[in-house]
Image (cartoon, rainbow, N blue to C red):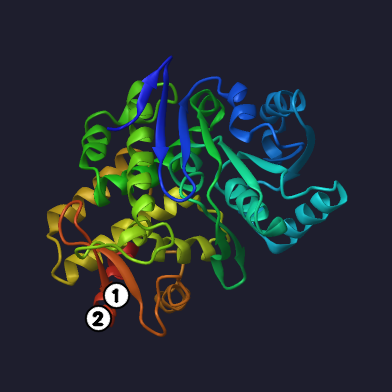
Amino acid sequence: MTGIVGHSETVLHVSGASPYDVVIGHGLTSRLATVLGPDVQRVALLYAGGIGELAQPVADALSEHYDVLALGLPDGEQAKTASVANDCWEALGAAGFTRSDAVVTFGGGATTDLGGFVAASWLRGVRVVHVPTTVLAMVDAAVGGKTGINTGAGKNLVGAFHEPAGVLCDLGLLASLPAAELSAGLGEVVKCGFIADPVILDIVEQHPLAALTHDSDLLRELIQRAIQVKIDVVVDDLKETGGVDGHPGREVLNYGHTMAHAVERFTDYQLRHGEAVAIGSVFVAELARLSGRIDEALVERHAAAFAKVGLPVGFAGAPYEDLRAAMAVDKKSRGSQLRFLVLEGLAVPRILAGPDEEHLRAAYECMVARA
């Protein structure tokens, strides 16, 4: 693994046109002023409303250097709406935020997505620093510059690419996570094992209890490895224009997500994102097997690895026709053609465009049978 380790901190650098660092460690609040820089006067702290007590030390630290506008958001996916974004824009306007001011997000993936979108769209882009509070946000939403909100048609269909000025992953915040939230965050981590870093799978399979322990060294390693996977991908393909030598580029990070987003929508987002990713990843593994890309053993490894960390691997809550229609508006679709990320072997991702309808239905039946 790459990175600079010292004083119990790991610094992973994201290069590119707008380079920044992802810092992993404990007690990182004091770094906020350094990352934000000296020219900022006002900071909007967008935080998940349910964790206001955790956000207070961050607000206090920011208040030592800046005028702070604290904006509590709805919890979870309820934050990711045009209405909530508009409320934030109105608050920024009333407070006189200029292009030299900044946004800090504090919360899970939904807070990061919404806060990043507000920062990307206010005055066509202001500085944003993410302080993710969940495993999911640390390894997924906070890194890579994707921001977005949901619409009635689907998840993350409105958004922008807007890279942060920095990401501070304070592992001490994981102590506040309910066990189910920690487990759900590992859905994105295990996904990274299948698409790029099989060592992740080895750790999860051999040490599942440590993977589910908020202060374990192995969980820290899993988080660092998953973040590095994402960094390696987005540096080469920030805006999903495609990879080289057959690699799908940034789209690979959406492994399992086509079905996952459909399932999330039909549960009204009551299913956690990482849980849906686990279900979607096993579904797409079955689709790859039916299409002659991988064998049964790799499909079963999918189901076993996600189950090791307490994640569901099947879903029977919606008819095939409804999920098929939802997948048709997935961002990877082109016209009427569905496109899926599949594997041709462990850590060998490829695009499967226009899969056989019989294979899709058969993979759905497998998904229902595993529920």
Tell me which residue sits at (64%, 49%) in the image: 115
Instruction: Point out residue 73 in the picture as x, y percentages from the top left corner.
Output: 72, 46
At numbered mark 2, what does the secondary structure look like: helix, strand or loop? loop
User: Vertically, is 89 above or below 291?
Assistant: above
User: Vertically, is 363 above or below 128?
Assistant: below
Left or right of 306? Residue 70 is right
Instruction: Point out residue 286 in the picture as x, y percentages from the top left corner.
Output: 23, 64
Q: Nearer the viewer, residue 197 or 291?
A: 197
Report the amino acid beneath label 1.
Leu
Instruction: Point out residue 182 in the picture as x, y percentages from the top left corner.
Output: 46, 36
Classify residue 227 by image quadrant. Answer: top left
Circles 2, 1 touching at the beta carbon (< 8 Å): yes
Residue farthest along the right direction in this orientation: 94
Tell me which residue sits at (38%, 34%) in the image: 223
Can residue 316 be seen here? The reply is yes
For the residue carrying disc 1, how many other residues have a C-alpha within 10 Å: few (<14), some (14-19), or many (20+)? many
- Figure quadrant of the N terminus: top left
User: Vertically, is 87 above or below 319?
Assistant: above
Tell me which residue sits at (70%, 63%) in the image: 82
Residue located beneath label 1 in the image: 360
At numbered mark 1, what does the secondary structure look like: helix, strand or loop? helix
Residue 84: which disc?
none
Q: Nearer the viewer, residue 339 or 371?
A: 339
Q: CA distance from mark 2 to mark 1?
A: 6 Å
Instruction: Point out residue 45 in the picture as x, y percentages from the top left corner.
Output: 71, 39
Residue located beneath label 2 in the image: 356
Q: Nearer the viewer, residue 283 or 222?
A: 222
For the residue carrying disc 2, how many other residues have a C-alpha within 10 Å: few (<14), some (14-19), or many (20+)? few
Tell me which residue sits at (29%, 75%) in the image: 360
Left or right of 116? Residue 195 is left
Report the amino acid beneath label 2.
Asp
- Figure quadrant of the C terminus: bottom left
